[in-house]
Image (cartoon, rainbow, N blue to C red):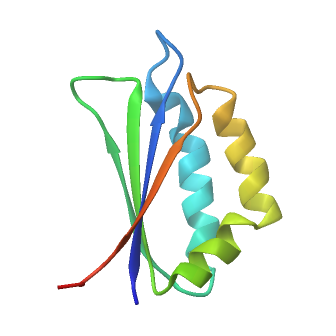
Amino acid sequence: MAIGVVIKRITKHGIDAKVILPHIIELRALAVRQPGYISGETFLNLDRPEECLVIGRWTSLEHWQQWKKDERRIELNENIEKHLETNAEYNIYGIGLW
């Protein structure tokens, strides 16, 4: 079953979320080469400039879990976390379930 992974990140007070975009772009460049990756989108909150939302689509939960444990992904994510107010919030949804 395909899944959507919603990642919400909030940067430290006074820091625009655009500061983490280069890291997110690099993550996506690596993700597109991973088994099971379908697509991804990044949203910047226009009312709250410190908030960033990423939605990734994967063919299965297992593929996402493999990518989440990837050493390079972990390293890039640590670079992002340095700018965050709190830990990123991850939510996983099934796609197309009725």
Is 75 positioned to the left or the right of 91 in the image?
right
Q: Is residue 77 shown above or below 12? A: below
Image coordinates of residue 48 in percent, x first then y, are 29, 23
- For image coordinates 56% across by 22% down, the residue present is 85
Quarter of the image with the N terminus is bottom left
- For image coordinates 50% across by 85% down, the residue present is 60
- For image coordinates 23% across by 29% down, the residue present is 46
Image coordinates of residue 35 in percent, x first then y, are 61, 87
Quarter of the image with the C terminus is bottom left
Q: Quadrant of residue 52?
A: top left
Q: Is residue 5 shown above or below 89? A: below
- For image coordinates 78% across by 60% down, the residue present is 72
| Residue lying at the far right of the rendered structure | 71
Is 71 positioned to the left or the right of 78 in the image?
right
Q: Is residue 52 shown above or below 34? A: above
Number of callouts: 0
| Residue lying at the far top of the rendered structure | 14
Q: Is residue 71 shown above or below 85? A: below
Is 62 positioned to the left or the right of 41 in the image?
right
Q: Quadrant of residue 81?
A: top right
Is 44 positioned to the left or the right of 27 in the image?
left
- 61 or 67, which is in the foreground? 61
| Residue lying at the far front of the rendered structure | 98
